[in-house]
Image: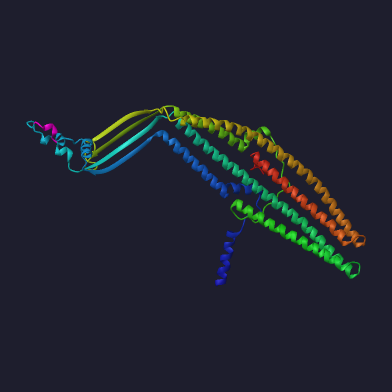
Amino acid sequence: MFIKRYIFLLVISLPLFAGVKNLSLSQAIGILKKDNLELKISRFNEQMKVYEVEATEALNYGKLDLTVSGMRSNDAGNVFGFKLQSREATFGDFGFSQFDPTNPNILDLQPEDLNYPDARNHFLTKISYMLPLYTGGKLTEYQHISESLHRMSQFDTKKLLNAKIYEVKKAFYDISLIDNYIYNLSKIMKNITKLESIIASMETEGYAKDTDLLEVQARKAEAESMYNQAKLNKDLAYQFLSFLLNQNVDTIRQVSTMAKMPRIDLQALLSNNIDIQKAKLGLEISKMAVEAETGNFRPEIGAFGEYGSADNVLFNDFFDKDFYTVGVQAKWNLFKGGADKANLEKAKVKRLMTEDQVRLAKKGIELQVKKLRTQILSEDADIRSYKKQLRFAKRVYANYSERYKEGMVSISDVLIKQSRELEVMLKLLTAKNKRNTKIFELDSILNRGGKV
């Protein structure tokens, strides 16, 4: 009974551990956009920038505070002030109970009620509102800067997405290349096994040497090692793909071993490239920063209002003892030791530097695209050459295998030709891998990484 229950639980839990099978590249990019952890973190950063924009915008609406305070004091100044704020001051508080008009020294009299009052409680409740009316343009520019920084965070997320799509594409094409390599390597291993069988038969009949068989077996062991290493590399590529997609991937839908060359439009490049867009946005921010620093030379105007009530008992006769204050304040800094001027000049220099950075980004990206295109065309030429060499190497190996049966060449000659086939095949694989990598880099620069 226990065994049946265990088997049942194991069966129903299998889907929980199974990975995605027959995954297409377009499906993988869709999963990446939704589940990649680095992209999720970047989007959280975007969200924080939204709240920073809201916090900056909120400064335009001023500040409203409710203050409730309770105090007790026997300090003469405090007690008299408490009574006065509570609208309870009397002539007796000034010491009139000791006033004697017949006393010639009345002016020297120190009134007890005024100097030594009884301790008093004081509860103050008030609402204060402060509103900036004019800040020299600084508040407006700070709001624009915070909005631009939010857009900058969106560019950062987009650039990260392009980088992750590049990695997903590379993983797909790497796996497809390795599968192609494994397929061709398995055919070579079959040829070696076939050659091993032929040598064994020839050795029985006395037409082959013992060392011939040993030499072939050594080559077979070498090929098996290469085969196992290729399978391990394929497993590693699947693990990396699973990491990118934040879920297990068992198998993918094969793609071509040669990625498609993108169409290059330099005019569109200057408009769509994310680094250039970030540089342009940085220039806008630097101009806003200059305007914000200029605001330090302008006056600031603010309004304030206050309403409250005070008494020796909390909330006692609130509206009978209430008070209000309203006002406007203008402040204009006339001298700060030259600090404002230095900060303004610094902002202007940074703006000039950013203008050059925009020009540098445009020229640098354009140069990088041209360089990548040249490298891709160079790899294309190498690939065409290696394909021809591989076809020739296969024919030479087949020819030498037949000639070995006829005793015209040694087994070493046959294996040398086979080594050449392996060598060219590895060169072809490497050239295709380099070409694909350059194309994915180009896609990322052209901001078209999402296109399959």
Asked whether 83 or 15 is in front, the reply is 83
Q: Is 107 covered by the magenta stretch?
A: yes
Q: Position of residue 21 (x, y in %)?
A: 65, 55
Q: Position of residue 180 (x, y in %)?
A: 74, 53
Residue at image location 67% in from the left, 48% down from the top: 170
Q: Which residues are magenta?
A: 104-109
Asked whether 218 or 32 is in front, the reply is 218
Above/below status of 251 relative to 78:
below
Q: Is 314 covered by the magenta stretch?
A: no
Left or right side of 352 for 442: right
Q: Residue furthest left?
A: 102
Residue at image location 62% in from the left, 54% down from the top: 242
Above/below status of 49 relative to 228:
above
| Image quadrant in which the N terminus is located | bottom right
Residue 288 seen from this side: no
Above/below status of 268 relative to 387:
above
Left or right side of 85 for 404: right
Left or right side of 90 for 382: right
| Colour mapping used in the image | rainbow
